[in-house]
Image: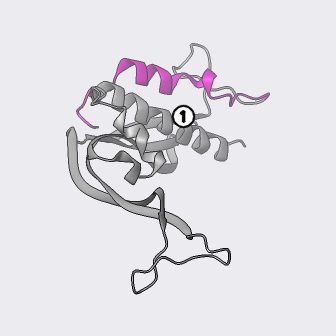
Amino acid sequence: ETNQVIPARLQDDLLDFSTYGINDKWTVYHNNRQKNINYDYGMIVNFRNIAISPEQVKEKQFIKEKQIKDGTKTLLDNNGNVVKDSLGNPIKVDNFKTISVSIYEFTQFKSCQVTAKVDYIDFRNNQLIDAFPVTSEFVFDYIYANYNGDKRACDDSYYQYFDRRAVPFPSNEQMIYDTGEDLKAKLKAIITNNKFRK
């Protein structure tokens, strides 16, 4: 129903019920009708919409500041006089300085959403038993950054972004396929939660 081409790899993977692990003693699933078998039930998956966002690169710039220890200094009172301990020695205290870094952050973003409808059919009377809407989404989100200044001003966990560069965006086919992995898990849940037997 989407009027879009679904990647063959996704179609094959979605229809490969052997990978779902759902067959049991009384129920066997086939992705295509087998000759000489009368089926009780059928499942039809109609893809309603495949939406892929454009490739986007969002940029932002921000400044981080931090106080760091920079040696020691002699403690002075409010009048500028050296403060001494009980032995007459000058008291030393940590000297702090403010460092800053200007960070240029880039976020590569692309998303894919696949919407489908699963119909359960009773083949004995050709009646629709139930219908389930299914939506899956996959998001490609990649951050890299560069900086100007003292990078110690930012959190250590942010350093990983400085070692990165832009990467190629996944193809539309890959995005649809990655979305299909989540869709497959949802289809399996629908099948296992709705085993129709009489």
Pick whichever, 123 or 48, lies toward us.
48
Residue position for label 1: 42
Q: Is residue 7 above or below residue 183?
A: above
Magenta span of residues = 1-25
Q: Is residue 144 above or below residue 14?
A: below
Q: Is residue 165 visible?
A: yes
Q: Is residue 10 above or below residue 62?
A: above
* Left or right of 42 in this view: 136: left
Q: Residue at x 38, y 61 (%)?
A: 97
Q: Position of residue 114 (x, y in %)?
A: 36, 41
Pick whichever, 75 or 116, lies toward us.
75
Q: Residue at x 42, y 24 (%)?
A: 10
Amino acid type, label 1: Gly
| Image quadrant where residue 48 sits | top left
Q: Residue at x 62, y 33 (%)?
A: 40
Quarter of the image where the C terminus is located: top right
**Dot 1: what SS?**
strand
Q: Position of residue 53 (x, y in %)?
A: 24, 42
| Image quadrant where residue 24 sits | top right
Q: Position of residue 2 (x, y in %)?
A: 27, 37
Q: Residue furthest right?
A: 25
Quarter of the image where the N terminus is located: top left
Pick whichever, 100 or 125, lies toward us.
100
Q: Residues within 10 Å of mark 1 (few under 14, many from 20)?
A: some
| Image quadrant where residue 27 sits | top right
